[in-house]
């Protein structure tokens, strides 16, 4: 699963590509449901800010966001929370996972996972728009798509055996347009 990530180089890369918007660098904790930088298939050249924790358009209230920080790739087409969601990219240059050092998960080691050259990458994401029936406020929200852990991620994320789906730069358009993609697994890790 992925509940913590960082965007420390995003502003520079984003500006260099000439995209529209105001990128914000930061370290994000999904449990606080922050607004995070995303690009959607509708506006691939415009940076938008969506709340992390997808609220489906049909939800009665926003309580569901506690359970939708991540979406399992294997079930995104069948789970009610995700099956009507649209695709987006969530940019990062690292994410954090904890390795269980004992069977109960009481002793853990935090790891920072990055690409080999610490370059910017994107998570596969899903998003939806929800209208608060009490206030009329429109809330755009998103989830990070996860898949089965591979390689070094099987060693680090040894409790749930999941990892975020990383989209390579040359496959971003393919993800947004719902075409087949190859998953990326070449990471460098460091204890934090």
Image (tube, rainbow, N blue to C red):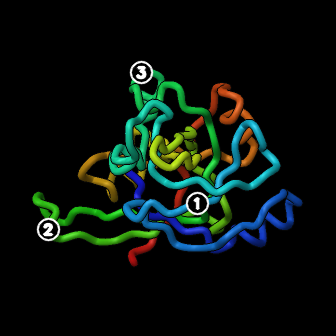
Check residue 135 in the rendering and tell me which mark sits there, or answer none.
none
**Which residue in the rendered view is the most extreme toward the right?**
18
**Which residue in the rendered view is the most extreme toward the top?**
78
Could you say which quadrant of the image residue 126 lies in? Answer: top right
- Label 3 and label 2: CA atoms lie apart by 34 Å
Q: Is residue 67 above or below residue 174?
A: below
Q: Residues within 10 Å of mark 1 (few under 14, many from 20)?
A: many
Q: Is residue 158 above or below residue 172?
A: below
Where residue 96 appears, as percent x and y from the top left, is: 43, 65
- Residue at the image position 40 percent from the left and 47 percent from the top: 62
Disc 2 designates what residue? 106
For the residue labelled by badge 3, is the local secondary structure a helix, a strand or a loop? loop
- Residue at the image position 38 percent from the left and 36 percent from the top: 60
> Which residue is at the front of the view, 13 or 63?
63
Where residue 57 appears, as percent x and y from the top left, is: 50, 34
Disc 3 designates what residue? 78
For the residue labelled by badge 1, is the local secondary structure a helix, a strand or a loop? strand
User: How many numbered circles are shown?
Assistant: 3
> Which residue is at the front of the view, 189 or 97?
97
Note whether residue 139 is visible: no
For the residue labelled by badge 2, is the local secondary structure a helix, a strand or a loop? loop
- Residue at the image position 11 percent from the left and 58 percent from the top: 103
- Residue at the image position 42 percent from the left and 21 percent from the top: 78
Disc 1 designates what residue? 36
- Quadrant showing the C terminus: bottom left
Residue 123 is left or right of residue 12, and the answer is left
Where residue 141 appears, as percent x and y from the top left, is: 53, 47
Residue 176 is left or right of residue 101, and the answer is right
Q: Residues within 10 Å of mark 3 (few under 14, many from 20)?
A: few
- Label 1 and label 3: CA atoms lie apart by 26 Å
Could you say which quadrant of the image residue 171 lies in? Answer: top right
Where residue 187 appears, as percent x and y from the top left, is: 53, 58
């Amino acid at each position: 699963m992925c509940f913590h990530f960082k965007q420390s180089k995003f502003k520079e890369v984003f500006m260099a590509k000439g995209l529209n918007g105001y990128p914000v660098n930061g370290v994000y904790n999904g449990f606080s449901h922050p607004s995070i930088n995303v690009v959607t298939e509708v506006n691939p050249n415009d940076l938008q800010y969506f709340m992390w924790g997808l609220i489906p358009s049909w939800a009665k209230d926003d309580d569901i966001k506690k359970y939708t920080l991540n979406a399992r790739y294997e079930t995104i087409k069948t789970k009610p929370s995700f099956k009507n969601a649209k695709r987006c990219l969530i940019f990062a240059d690292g994410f954090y996972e904890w390795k269980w050092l004992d069977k109960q998960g009481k002793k853990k080691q935090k790891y920072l996972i990055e690409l080999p050259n610490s370059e910017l990458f994107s998570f596969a994401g899903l998003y939806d728009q929800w209208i608060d029936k009490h206030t009329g406020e429109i809330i755009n929200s998103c989830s990070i798509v996860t898949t089965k852990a591979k390689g070094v991620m099987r060693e680090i994320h040894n409790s749930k055996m999941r990892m975020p789906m990383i989209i390579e730069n040359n496959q971003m358009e393919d993800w947004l347009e719902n075409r087949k993609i190859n998953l990326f697994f070449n990471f460098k890790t460091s204890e934090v």
